[in-house]
Amino acid sequence: MLSPVAGCSALPPNSGTKPQNTPNRRRHFISLLQNCKHNNQIPPIHAKIIRNHHHQDPFVVFELLRVCSNLNSIGYASKIFSHTQNPNVYLYTALIDGLVLSCYYTDGIHLYYQMINSSLVPDSYAVTSVLKACGCRLALKEGREVHSQVLKLGLSSNRSIRIKLIELYGKCGAFDDARQVFDEMPERDVVCWTAMIDGLVRNGESNRALEVFRNMQREDVMPNEVTIVCVLSACSELGALQLGRWVHSYMDKHGIELNHFVGGALINMYSRCGDIDEAQRVFEQMKEKNVITYNSIALLSACKIHGNLELAERVAKSLVACKNADSGTYILLSNAYSSSGKWKEAAEVRTNMREEGIEKEPGCSSIEVNNEIHEFLLGDLRHPQKEKIYKKLEELNQILRLEGYTPATEVVLHDIEKSEKEWALAIHSERLAICYGLISTKPLTTIRVVKNLRVCNDCHLTIKLISNITMRKIVVRDRNRFHHFENGVCSCGDYW
Ligand code: ZN
Ligand code: ZN
């Protein structure tokens, strides 16, 4: 985050209604804002600021935007910004930063362009934020544009910007570009190395990721937690149990704490490599009971895949008992029951979930077409091109049926009719996003979809087939990982 001092040093003189006793009042409001602990304290202070005609004072507005962003009131910050006359680059940057921190990446990118179009020159803070947004949105085209601005503005030696560029290119699978930025860095610390490894792992390039990791060790750079997680993930992918064990012992030797982050990765690695006993041992060793959910979900997934229903039950029950179950836990357990035909138990889990007041987060997929993000929910009918999208969906379903594909209806709730079950699967949000991508982009263009939840088994299988039928590369980033579908196979090897 841009520091208020750095931001203030070059602010233009205040315009608009002249507030009284400016420096003292300004200091007063800034200190009031800095002492805010909760977002409900902001509106009354804001009202006071308006009454004292300080609402166009860039110093005060800067602090307002910063405090709103930190206290999770990004909507309020946007409103304040929209009422600010001729916002300067610091105010733009404060809001861009806030939007990105609150995961409103597309809005952050739009605001950055709005700033450029107002002939303001972005500084390194704005560039760092927007590059992060481009990385999270996989907006490679915009990211490249920002990169060329970086070169023109002479910001290319900035370390944070370089790291964000490596992350952006890595996430988007543009490894040559990532490599070039990486090679040009005068000093490569663990963060740079990890950014490279992470990009490769996310895109299923596990062998290359491990090669980079070995080079990193040759240069005597100590891995951090994030590196360890990335390497474990590559091991899972390759089924490289021996290397995974080596990383585990490396962690023990160097006193790397078994927190939920690293623990989850270890559990995942052991589960995937088929060593469920070791996965369970790590699970039981974990101290952080409050954030246990993530690990258990990894273990639950493994139990489901390896058909270990008994262990799945035990893990899920311990989670429910310590009030740590979220919707994902319940759904995984319920699906584990459904797929072994235990409908009664599956229904009970769903009932418990409702009784505990845990809502299922709605699935939402987005796709970027012609610089615009299109979002789809389950069975979404809001899109202006909905007729064409559903027509494409039906067309694909027919081809799939002709190819002998049968939907995996057991993942859907059991209390609906079979044809309805098929329909419920067919309208999962990622399929709508993919169909929109198919009708709105040129043949052979790669389709990139981002989904907030895990892709279900049936969609995963269907997307593999769609990639084959349409001869398209389809990249789906779900809650857990990236899936690169091509010629009927997925980079995850059907484990996710
Ligand atoms: Zn699905
Ligand atoms: Zn996959």
Image: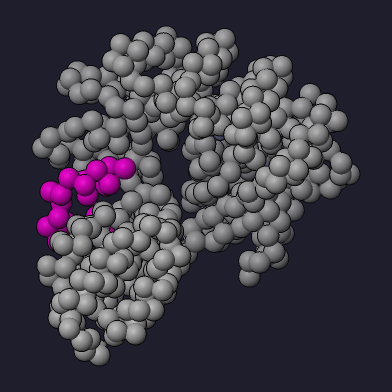
- The spot of residue 174 in percent (x, y) is 34, 43
User: Could you tell whether 191 is left or right of 326 in the image?
Assistant: left
Q: Residue at x 36, y 73 (%)?
A: 45
Residue span colored magenta: 146-167
Q: Camera-side residue: 435 or 118?
A: 118
- The spot of residue 315 in percent (x, y) is 64, 22
Q: Camera-side residue: 440 or 173?
A: 173
Q: Residue at x 10, y 37 (%)?
A: 186
Residue 256 against residue 160 in the figure, above or below: above
The reply to whether the magenta stretch includes residue 154 is yes
The reply to whether the magenta stretch includes residue 83 is no
- The spot of residue 375 in percent (x, y) is 57, 59
Specify the farthest residue to the bottom. 17
Query: Looking at the magenta stretch, what is its main secondary structure?
Result: helix
Q: Residue at x 86, y 44 (%)?
A: 416
Residue 396 against residue 193 in the figure, above or below: below
Split into 4 quadrants, where in the image is the C terminus? top right
User: Could you tell whether 88 is left or right of 256 in the image?
Assistant: left
User: Could you tell whether 436 is left or right of 254 in the image?
Assistant: right
